[in-house]
Image (tube, rainbow, N blue to C red):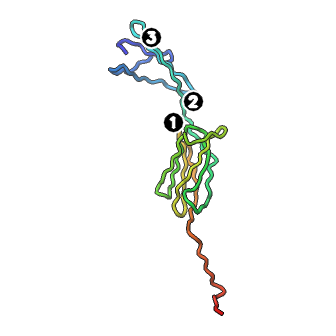
Amino acid sequence: FKTGTKLYVNGADKTADVSSNGNFKTIKTLTTETRQEIIVSAQTPAGNTGEKSFWVRYDKTAPAISDVIIAPATDTTPAPMMGKVDDGLATITIVNIDKQNDITTIYPGDLTADGDKFKFNVNIPLKEGSNQLKITASDKAGNQSAVTTKIISLDTGSPIVKITKPAQVEI
């Protein structure tokens, strides 16, 4: 921008910090959680104008996780887990507290549309014994869901069968 250029955001005159290469930054406060068009226009002292617009969405609602299913016990690792999230752009994080905070991440591209929700399927590495899993979803705005906790037990040992009665007798 040249000296004296006026900047407008959605028609309102704005003060902006303009760098030496002509870039600027200003603040537009969003107050409602809807999709909104931002129109930025500029006018030089000679009356020349330019305009650009883009769409934004103010988002303060965290995604919600539901229908998380994992068997309570298994004899194999990794164990299959599935669930749903209501935001198709969410990133899902699964932390296995009992496996040195081992993290499994599911990215938006790995979600599958399922009605008004998005399904995820993942195989979770387990350690022998009890595994406490903490599952969260985060959206692009940084909002994080409530934590969903699941417990699964991995038992790969064979049972030991011992007969104590009757005593073994040779004939």
The tag on residue 160 is none
Q: How many marks?
A: 3
Q: Which residue is mark 2?
A: 33
The reply to whether discs 2 and 3 touch (Cβ–Cβ < 8 Å) is: no
Q: Which quadrant would the C terminus be assigned to in this image? A: bottom right
* Residue type, numbered disc 2: Glu
Helix, strand or loop under label 1: loop
Q: Which quadrant would the N terminus be assigned to in this image? A: top left
85 with respect to 97 (left or right): right
Tell me the crowding category of disc 1: few under 14, some 14 to 19, or many 20 or more residues within 10 angstroms, Cα based. few
* Residue type, numbered disc 1: Lys
Q: Residue at x 51, y 54 (%)?
A: 96
Question: x, y percentage for residue 69?
Answer: 63, 52
The earlier-in-sequence mark between 2 and 1 is 2
Q: Quadrant of residue 77?
A: bottom right
Question: x, y percentage for residue 34?
Answer: 58, 27
Tell me the crowding category of disc 3: few under 14, some 14 to 19, or many 20 or more residues within 10 angstroms, Cα based. few
Q: Residue furthest front?
A: 171
Q: Residue at x 41, y 23 (%)?
A: 25
Q: Which residue is mark 1?
A: 140
